[in-house]
Amino acid sequence: MTQVEETIRQEAEEYQGAGDQPLGGYALTAAAYLGLVGAGLLVVRRRRDAGLRAAVGPWDLVLMSLATHKASRMVAKDPVTSPLRAMFTRFRGVSAPAELAEEPRGEGGRRAVGELVACPFCLAQWVATGYAFGLVLAPRFTRSAGAVLSAVAVSDWLQLAYAKLQQAQE
C-alpha cells in the first residue's frame, strides 16, 4: 500500500469512528455526478456553438423548484418506483400517504447509492441539475415535463390538505 493510500485509509477510519459511512461509495457517487455534469457541459458547449442560447427566468425557477421537489420525492418514496430502489434499499414500511420508508443496504458503493435513491433531499441536486441541462438542450420539452410534475406536486399538497380537513371534521 502506498503512503497516499495509507493516509487516506487512516483519515477515513478517523472520520468514521464507530460509524459505518461508506466514504469510498460517496466518493464514487460524487465522481459520477461530476462526470455527468462534465459530459453535460461538453454537450452544451457543442450545441451552444450551433447557436443555442439558454435563459432561466423567474418562472422557470419556480417551475424547476416544484418539479425538482416532485421528481425527487417520486423517485425516492413512491411505491411505483420501488423496483428502481430495490437493489439498493430495504423496505421498512409506509412513511406517509403514498410514500414508503426504506433504508439503504449493503456496503460501499451499493450503500451510498441506497442512501442517494432513498433520500429526496439528496436526489434533488441530481434532479435540478438534469432539469437545468434540459432547459438548455430541450427547453420546450423540459418546461412541459416540469409543468406536469409541478401540477402533480400542487395536487399532492391539495390532497393532503383535503385529508386534514376531513379528519378535522370527524
Image (spheres, rainbow, N blue to C red):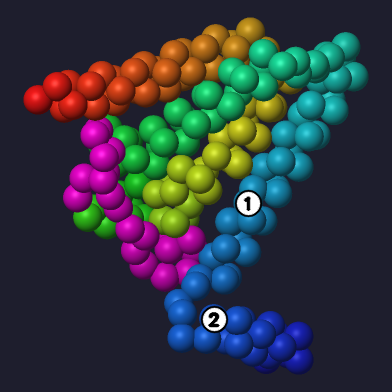
Indicate the position of residue 57 as horizontal and vertical percent values. 75, 15
Q: Residue furthest left?
A: 170
Give the quarter of the image for residue 59.
top right
Would you say residue 95 sits in the magenta stretch?
A: yes
> Helix, strand or loop at disc 1?
helix
Q: CA distance from mark 1 to mark 2?
A: 22 Å
105 is higher (above) or lower (below) than 87: below
> Is 73 placed left or right of 93 in the picture?
right
Tell me, for residue 47, which label it has, or none: none
Q: Residue furthest front?
A: 169
Residue at left offset 88%, top offset 11%: 51
Indicate the position of residue 96 as horizontal and vertical percent values. 26, 40
Is residue 163 among what the camera can see? no
Indicate the position of residue 101 as horizontal and vertical percent values. 28, 49
Question: Which residue range is magenta in the image?
Answer: 93-112
Give the quarter of the image for residue 95.
top left
> Helix, strand or loop at disc 2?
helix
> Is 158 placed left or right of 130 in the picture?
left
Would you say residue 153 sits in the magenta stretch?
A: no
102 is higher (above) or lower (below) than 148: below
The quadrant of the rendering that contains the C terminus is top left
Tell me, for residue 32, which label it has, or none: 1
6 is higher (above) or lower (below) than 84: below
Other-residue count near label 2 (Cα within 10 Å), few / some / many at <14 / 14–19 / ≥20? few
Other-residue count near label 1 (Cα within 10 Å), few / some / many at <14 / 14–19 / ≥20? few
Residue at left offset 30%, top offset 53%: 102
Indicate the position of residue 12 as horizontal and vertical percent values. 61, 81
Q: Amino acid at mark 2?
A: Gln
Mark 2, residue position: 16
Q: Amino acid at mark 1?
A: Ala
